[in-house]
Amino acid sequence: MDESDEGVIERLQLREAGFLKRAAVLLFHPAPDRFVMEAYVKIGYFRGSELLYQDVIEGDLFTQVDRTMDLLYTKYTKALISYDGVYRVETFPVPCEAMREAVINAIIHRDYASPTTIQIRVYDDQIAIWNAVQLPSEWAADQLAGELSSNPYNPRIAYAFFRAGMIEAWGRGIRRIAEMCKEAGNPAPEWKLQSSGDGLWLRFPFSAAYQAADSATTPKTSQEQEKTREKTREKILALITADSSITTAELANRLGITAKGVEWQIGRLKKMGVLKRIGPAKGGHWKGPCQASTWRRSLVALRPFMVKLGCGGGPSSKPPPSCTVRRGANFMLWT
């Protein structure tokens, strides 16, 4: 573009009485939040009510659009991969063009006098966008996807985006979002006006097919993995309590895991002082908890398991009446 900066400012009508308008700062300043409160976008990934991680996207409004889209489709969502012949096909939970239209809409129509920034919340089953808006009095949230005239809240910002070729300026943006989601086989997006009337929610529900495929390929979190391991250890102890001569191969077969997996779990139980092997691999047997000096610590670690067996599990020095105590030179076991 050969036009000078002054020429662009004049063409976009971003000066008044010799002073730059606020829209000029938002559109072209690298740090508009220095002059306009909360002039940035926040993205967060939530699981339930817990925020797992987040990003703040700063810069001029054009940069905010590009960086928001880049983060949404490289960090916050993932594509399901399929193949059409030899061609790789990526399917995201929300069509990229629909999301881009929504992000641009939020940035153009935001009430920049509001102290609250644009928020994009990503969940396992949906993406929700909140924006501070002031809808025309004759508009309602359930009418937004219908036929409406173009009535931008920030006309100078909208005009700059129009001249950049990023919007049509026909008032069809929201309708196009709904159409693109329908064409992709996604559930219809939902618009809901905040009860106070100064904020608008846009929700993109993920399709059931995407959620099912995503859950099948999503690895468990470390917390979920540890819970699974704890349950496996409880099952091992229950099987050993029922048959102290059970072999590693038999444990693996009963639990449906590999022999190496059983050996790893048994190693953990030995380190906890909960389990001890007496004799060789063939002909030996299991005993535990081991070491009389550590039985209190072992019992605390085994509390959930002991409760399941009906043996209490409290760290008192005396066992519950329903349990039998067997003592040896180097172990004490409640059964």
Image (cartoon, rainbow, N blue to C red):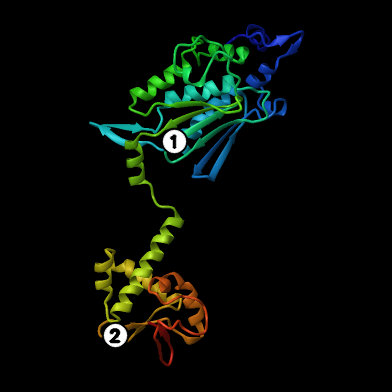
**Residue 308 at x, y = what percent?**
39, 70
The answer to whether marks 1 and 2 mark residues whose Cβ atoms lie closer than 8 Å is no
Q: 294 or 300, which is in the foreground?
A: 300
Disc 1: which residue: 126
Q: Which residue is mark 2?
A: 284
Looking at the picture, does residue 247 appear above or below residue 327? above
Q: Quadrant of residue 241?
A: bottom left
Q: Tell me the tag on residue 116.
A: none
**SS for dot 2:** loop
Q: Residues within 10 Å of mark 1 (few under 14, many from 20)?
A: some
Would you say 322 lies left or right of 15 here? left
138 sits to left or right of 250: right
Three-letter amino acid code at disc 1? Gln
- Point out the frontmost of discs 1 and 2: 1
**Residue at far front of view:** 321
Residue at screen point 36% across, 34% down: 207
